[in-house]
Amino acid sequence: MTTKQITGEFTVTLAPIEGYAHGQQGINLGRMSIDKQFTGSLTVTSQGEMLSAMTPTQGSAGYVAIEQVIGELESKKGSFVLQHFGLMDKGQDSLILKVVPDSGTDELAGLTGSMAIRIEQGIHHYDFEYSL
């Protein structure tokens, strides 16, 4: 199995949705819908949800998210699920995005990989390293 790396751009729309848990003692718990459009070698749309916790300390927060990605990866059609794990520690961020094992469908069955996100001049970029 060969590992490939692709890059491209995406747009994202986040909107607050009603959550079950409400933060206390200075913690703000949030829930958001995620809608994305990717361009480049990954021509897909995705939808998902994000849960976040903002602390009273400037620049310290955490989030988790799940999004289902549907469309084409280098002309192969199908879908897969990305899982996010993000932390900010006084402004220093760490972000892990992985393909959920066995979530690939159709021509993307068996997909594994991880994604990095960069924001440069307000434009969101993805770097996706995958095996299929």
Image (cartoon, rainbow, N blue to C red):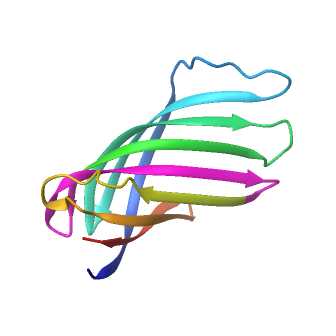
Check the picture and name the quadrant holding the N terminus. Answer: bottom left
Residue 83 in magenta stretch: yes
Is residue 17 positioned above or below 101 on the image? above
Residue at coordinates 23% horizontally, 51% vertically from top-left? 79
Quarter of image, res 34: top left
Q: Position of residue 50 (x, y in %)?
A: 52, 37
Give the vertical position of 109 relative to 57 (above or below). Answer: below
Q: Is residue 4 left or right of residue 32?
A: left
Q: Is residue 23 above or below residue 80?
A: above
Residue name at image x 20 percent, y 58 percent: 109
Q: The C terminus appears in which quarter of the rendering?
A: bottom left
Q: Residue at x 56, y 20 (%)?
A: 19
x and y percentages locating residue 117 in the rendered image: 51, 63
Is 37 situated left or right of 96 in this image? left
In depth, the one of 71 and 101 nearer the eye is 101
Residue 62 lies in magenta, yes or no?
no
Residue 27: % across, % down: 78, 29
Looking at the image, the residue that sits furthest to the bottom is 2
8 vs 123, nearest the viewer: 8
Q: Main secondary structure of the magenta part?
A: strand
Taking 78 as reference, is 19 left or right? right
Residue for point 49% across, 61% down = 123
| Span highlighted in magenta in the image | 71-92
Instruction: State how many labels appear.
Output: 0
Residue 58 position in % (x across, y down): 84, 45
